[in-house]
Amino acid sequence: MVQIPVDLPTGATTVSADWTTGGNRTVIAIAHGAGTGKDHPFLTGFAAALGELGFSTLRFNFPYVEQGRKMPGPAAHAIATWNAVVEFARANEPSASVWVAGKSYGGRMASMAVADGLVVDGLAYLGYPLHPPGRPEKPRAEHLPAISVPQLFVEGTNDPFIQPISQFEEAVASCQDARVVWVEGGGHTFEVKGHKRPASEIGSSLAPLVAEFARR
């Protein structure tokens, strides 16, 4: 485990991260969802599978998790953390490309950081939270068209955060360079009714999709 310094608007802090070096000169930085942390089995399974495919991985916590809180802090704190994480990755593998991936909230915060100027090679969203469940009138997509690097949306067809799907498809169509990979029957955590699997197995099953995207 490593500690990454982060300059927040409220002052300096550090966040915990797990850094694993691969051999293919590509780093994938991975952020957790709003109600979890970097050590959730979904993320550890996802990162381990990417590592087996040769990628360097960097899983990290957002500051609010480090502080023992359950609810995310200001978006500016998450954006500052993403900037620090990518800076750490580039410092440790200067010749590598850097891709970022996030589960739900973590992916949305990555997209906001990139729209705000963070330089990466691409973004992968594991369940992009287009709107709160049942609140399609509150979409979170206005910044997506500003992103010029490739974007991959891995989405479950039954995810309540993207219903109606037609609205989600409109948001993706507004992007400069985006594609969607559907998980048939998948919910927000990619669970499929009648097909129970451990979270670590679900996470690892998504790694090849992101690996193919990062190798484009």
Image (spheres, rainbow, N blue to C red):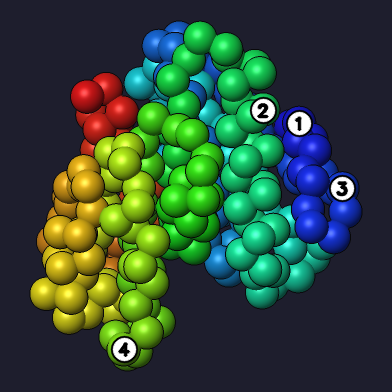
Q: Earlier in the sequence, mark 4 or mark 1?
A: 1
Q: Is disc 1 placed on a helix, strand or loop?
A: strand
- Residue underneath mark 1: 2
Q: Is disc 3 placed on a helix, strand or loop?
A: strand
Q: Are marks 2 and 4 in contact (CB under 8 Å)?
A: no
Does residue 192 lie above or below 179 as drawn? Answer: below
- Residue underneath mark 2: 88
Real-space Cα separation, disc 3 to disc 4, in angstroms: 36 Å
Q: Position of residue 29 (x, y in %)?
A: 52, 36
- Quadrant of res 11: bottom right
The disc label shown at residue 137, or none = 4
Real-space Cα separation, disc 2 to disc 4, in angstroms: 37 Å
Q: Position of residue 142 (x, y in %)?
A: 35, 68
Kindly identify the residue that appears in the image at 17 percent across and 47 percent down. Answer: 179
The disc label shown at residue 12, or none = 3
Q: Amino acid at mark 2?
A: Phe
Q: Are marks 1 and 2 in contact (CB under 8 Å)?
A: yes
Instruction: Rate crowding at label 1 as few (under 14), some (14 to 19) or many (20 or more) other CA atoms within 10 Å.
Output: few
Kindly identify the residue that appears in the image at 57 percent across and 12 percent down. Answer: 94
* Foreground of the two, 8 or 5: 8
Real-space Cα separation, disc 1 to disc 2, in angstroms: 10 Å
